[in-house]
Image (cartoon, rainbow, N blue to C red):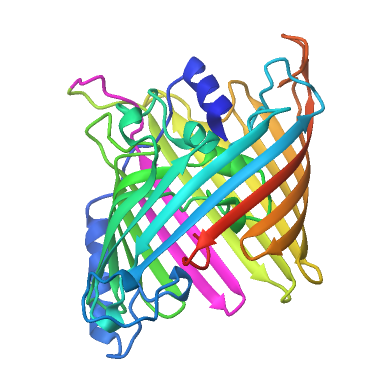
């Protein structure tokens, strides 16, 4: 989303984020529920860390530090994109990683190393490190507007350690820097239906640093609670911590539903003892339904509010995204995405209604190499998109993209 977005936001304002207004009793409730679940859970219940999509090795080892527990993955995303507006600065506005027009670009090169917990084999700890390079690094790894020392952590997309406590079905606690779970789309293009990321990925938080705890209350319900430094903050720039609560539900075998609420202070305090004024809150929920083995439908809905000063009227952004993917015969897939954002000036420097529609055709040559062709149209109710003439703006922006994605390693599933 961001190289251009972060730069333009830094010119107009600092990052805006929210006040942590939840009482400490909420944390007590979460752990109280964990203790209750522990008392009620059957002895053979599966721990939280024993997830099939974590790609855990099935090799046995008598040593808890054996390399048999280690998975790794390497990915490379490259593209060429043509912008029909032919912007004078070759910048595609409102894009996350595909920010440059008429350029052969490297969106992202990433290395993932993970040693996941394996409780059934007596291993309750684990760790994960994601290294990130290329355009994505500049886009998502904070700017001086919201990171005190962004250069120190520039290439660390994720770095966290894990321990699974013997509580209920397994209380998994992570400490470090981890990707945000707000919004449907992810950092890795191979795990998304589109090559470009949408508005919601662009605007919603990318990452946090702190502590998070996840507890499967039942086989179909998991609760998560996190205390973090703030949005896009590996290090904090004030003395207040942000908080997030997430509920993940699987009411049916082919249906998953996630609801999250985030709140925190997100303005720097300037090393002053008085608290920052800005209050930033996010409500986000997304639903995924596998209609048939070939057709999957998803929807993402969120509302974000922010106040620059505590007594000001809050600015807000309401966004919705809908997604459909059809796996045609063989290695071919077709996907569409539509997003609508009613922005009062949080996402862009001006208040406007933004929409985008994307159609993507995919051909998977092998498990580890795929090609995507993408047509995308962005439009607004106000002149916003740049053209080949500086200062002349259009209501719309049309792009054509060819994207290539490679990945390899023994880490399976979604990264």
Figure quadrant of residue 324: bottom right
Can the viewer see residue 345? no
On whether residue 85 falls in the magenta region, the answer is no
In front of the other: 323 or 286:
323
Q: Is residue 131 left or right of residue 134?
A: left
> Residue 268's quadrant in the figure?
top left
Seen at 54% across and 34% down, the residue is 135
From the viewer's perspective, is 400 left or right of 131? Answer: right
Percent of width and height locating residue 253: 58, 80
Q: Name the foreground residue: 27 vs 83.
A: 83
Residue 87: x %, y % from top left: 74, 19
Q: Residue 313 or 408: which is nearer the viewer? A: 408
* Towards the viewer: 353 or 207: 207
Q: Residue furthest left?
A: 273
The secondary structure that most of the magenta stretch takes on is strand
Q: Quadrant of residue 361?
A: bottom right
Residue 80: image location, x then y, percent: 72, 36
Looking at the image, is 401 positioned above or below residue 407? above
Is residue 253 shown in magenta? yes
- The boundaries of the magenta stretch are 244-272
* Residue at x 50% of width, y 16% of height: 12
Q: Quadrant of the N terminus?
A: top right
Asked if residue 81 lies left or right of residue 315, the reply is right
In the rendered image, the vertical position of residue 351 relative to residue 116, given as above or below: above
Tally of numbered discs: 0
């Amino acid at each position: 989303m961001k190289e251009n977005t972060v730069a333009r936001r830094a010119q107009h304002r600092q990052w805006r984020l929210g006040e942590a207004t939840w009482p400490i009793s909420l944390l007590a409730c979460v752990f109280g529920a964990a203790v209750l679940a522990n008392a009620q859970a059957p002895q053979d219940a599966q721990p939280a860390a024993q997830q099939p999509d974590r790609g855990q090795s099935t090799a046995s080892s008598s040593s808890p530090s054996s390399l048999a527990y280690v998975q790794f993955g390497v990915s490379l995303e490259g593209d060429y994109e043509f912008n029909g507006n032919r912007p004078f600065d070759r910048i595609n506005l409102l894009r996350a990683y595909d920010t440059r027009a008429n350029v052969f670009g490297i969106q992202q090169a990433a290395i993932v190393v993970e040693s996941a917990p394996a409780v059934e084999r007596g291993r309750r700890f684990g760790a994960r490190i994601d290294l990130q390079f290329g355009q994505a690094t500049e886009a998502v790894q904070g700017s001086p507007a919201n990171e005190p020392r962004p250069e120190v952590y520039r290439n660390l997309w994720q770095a966290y350690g894990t321990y699974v406590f013997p509580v209920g079905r397994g209380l998994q606690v992570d400490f470090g820097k981890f990707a945000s779970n707000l919004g449907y789309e992810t950092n890795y293009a191979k795990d998304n239906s589109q090559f470009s990321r949408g508005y919601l990925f662009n605007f919603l938080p990318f990452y946090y640093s702190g502590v998070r705890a996840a507890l499967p209350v039942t086989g179909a319900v998991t609760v998560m609670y996190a205390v973090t430094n703030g949005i896009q903050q590996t290090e904090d720039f004030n003395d207040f911590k942000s908080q997030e609560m997430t509920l993940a539900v699987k009411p049916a075998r082919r249906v998953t539903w996630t609801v999250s609420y985030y709140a925190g202070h997100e303005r720097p305090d300037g090393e002053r003892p008085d608290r920052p004024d800005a209050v930033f809150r996010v409500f986000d929920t997304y639903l995924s339904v596998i209609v048939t083995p070939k057709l999957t439908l998803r929807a993402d809905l969120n509302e974000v509010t922010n106040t620059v000063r505590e007594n000001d009227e809050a600015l807000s952004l309401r966004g919705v995204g809908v997604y459909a993917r059809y796996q045609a015969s063989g290695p071919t897939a077709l996907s569409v995405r539509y997003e609508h954002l009613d922005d009062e000036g949080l996402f862009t420097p001006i208040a406007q209604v933004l929409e985008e529609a994307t159609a993507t055709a995919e051909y998977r040559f092998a498990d580890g190499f795929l090609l995507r062709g993408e047509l995308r149209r962005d439009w607004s109710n106000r002149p916003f998109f740049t053209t080949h003439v500086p200062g002349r703006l259009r209501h719309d922006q049309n792009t054509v993209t060819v994207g290539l994605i490679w990945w390899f390693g023994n880490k399976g599933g979604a990264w």
